[in-house]
Amino acid sequence: MKTIEKSTPCELCMSRKFSLFSNLTEPHLCHLSDHKNFITHKKGQILFYEGTKPLGVFCINDGVVKVFKTASNGKEQIIRLAKKGDFLGYASLLGEESYSNSATIVEDAKICFVPRESFLKVLAEDTEFHRRVTKALCHDLGIMEDKLTDATQKSIRERLAFTLLKLSETYGIDGKEGEKIDIVLTREEIAGLVGTATETVIRLLSEFKKDELIDFEGKKILVLDKRGLARLSDFYG
Amino acid sequence: MKTIEKSTPCELCMSRKFSLFSNLTEPHLCHLSDHKNFITHKKGQILFYEGTKPLGVFCINDGVVKVFKTASNGKEQIIRLAKKGDFLGYASLLGEESYSNSATIVEDAKICFVPRESFLKVLAEDTEFHRRVTKALCHDLGIMEDKLTDATQKSIRERLAFTLLKLSETYGIDGKEGEKIDIVLTREEIAGLVGTATETVIRLLSEFKKDELIDFEGKKILVLDKRGLARLSDFYG
DNA sequence: CAGATAACATGACAAATATCACATTAATCA
DNA sequence: TGATTAATGTGATATTTGTCATGTTATCTG
């Protein structure tokens, strides 16, 4: 299923510009280029499973990947959606633990796999890079704290509104009428993102539509009233 | 209020053995000793506020500190309880961001404050230390993913049972009848830990007591039936 | 010690949300 | 294309949980 093809060398990779690899030295970039593995993945394919050992890190060149945990009730809690320029699996690798989550392709993706040794070599030799990785980890930690607090202290309606805002921020493209969230997510996936039941998402989305906060265009969501969603997503507003 | 007194030098500090500082070189330990600031804090005092800039890291010598976020509804979501050997505030420092959370003393504490420059100096000069810090951050990230998943997918009853188990794991001391959670938390704080309302905690705790899973001894909780709590905390069991 | 305040407790109630069952529509694929 | 499966939608219902009100008990402080 997975297609291995010739890829842009890291030195010329455009998505690198926005990633942790942005400021590497020429030799390090060449090293990565020589050792990386470029694979095209189709929607639904699995990148890695929770509980398995990380053998390297994934670097998304294009596409969207969902990182999720499977709860004991069988539902998926989506930790984050990763897009172009994002890294995957480095926390588990650096934590010297098994993957704490699973990852599957949500939108067809081109992904480079950098084997463990190459990644660790660059990390060890480029202190500045190590510092950037550390910084990214710290930032992610802060985001997780926010998510936890929202999960326990906000209602589903608020969280869904907030999720839609965040999605439009990241995947939004302007159209004649509102911003289109240019990514196809099932209601079940949105539920996994918010942390609720699929039916609840369906009901709330139609409510939002009725209130003219959003609209549907095929499988995609159109955000009509950001301010309205923002008001809904906040406790005071 | 805060008492500055003479303290053990880092070289001789016992709580260091269990901390990230455990394997530092002699010169680095001396450097830290020379620049650190030892302060005794009383219950209720504030270590730092969310939104302020970190000027260094805190290293707990003794006592318990709660790290929490204040949600928009005014309630506190406790991110973690930090104890002897734990570090505080390094994620915000290394993330070069303001504190993402606040910290206050839960049990009288002795805490060393290591100023930013000293910490960063050691971090820059001791690659192995930097690696350990990174590893700790990655581990914390995994824990936060678990907490988020639990928060969205488990009931309050399950989460409370789980919280009690975790507390007894960390702060438990064996007694004639069950394990005593040797730390005083108000119902409100337990609610903040679980992510629920205080009244709900009160009700569930009496339910647990009625079911002979726990008992109260003064302000402290006695865990009578770990297996029972474990069964309650899990979806399948 | 008394008064004030914080913590704990309980009842009544409303609201949000999960669950189950089933209908409809869309997508996939042999 | 027709059949199968996945996704979406809707209704009914039960339950959990939050909120508010109020009372009691413990703790603190002058």
Image (tube, coloured by chain):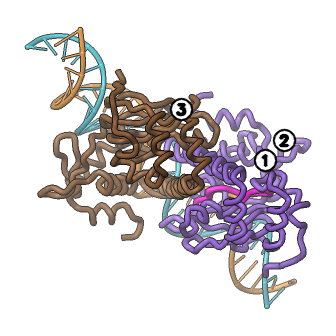
Chain colours: A brown, B purple, C orange, D cyan
In the structure shown, which secondary structural element does the residue marked by tag 2 occupy?
Answer: loop
Pick whichever of labels 1 and 2 is earlier in the sequence. 2
Q: Which residue is mark 1?
A: B215
Q: Residue drawn 65% across and 47% down?
A: B135
Which label belongs to residue A50?
3
Return the residue at label 2: B178
Nearest the camera: A2 or B148?
A2
Residue A26 % position (x, y): 46, 49
Q: In the image, is A65 to the left or to the right of B208?
A: left
Residue B155 vs A175, above or below: the answer is above
Within 10 Å of disc 2 (Cα), the crowding (few <14, some 14-19, many 20+) is some
* Mark 1 → mark 2, Cα distance in angstroms: 9 Å
Magenta region: which residues?
Answer: B75-87
Image coordinates for residue A4, horizontal then vertical, percent: 36, 26
Disc 1 and disc 3 in contact, CB within 8 angstroms: no
Q: Please say whether residue B79 is one of the residues in the magenta stretch.
A: yes
**Chain designation of label 2:** B
The C terminus of chain A lies in quadrant: bottom left
Answer with left or right where residue A186 lies relative to residue A137. Answer: left
Q: Secondary structure at mark 3?
A: loop
Chain letter belonging to callout 3:
A
Q: CA distance from mark 2 to mark 3?
A: 35 Å
User: Numbered disc 1: what chain?
Assistant: B
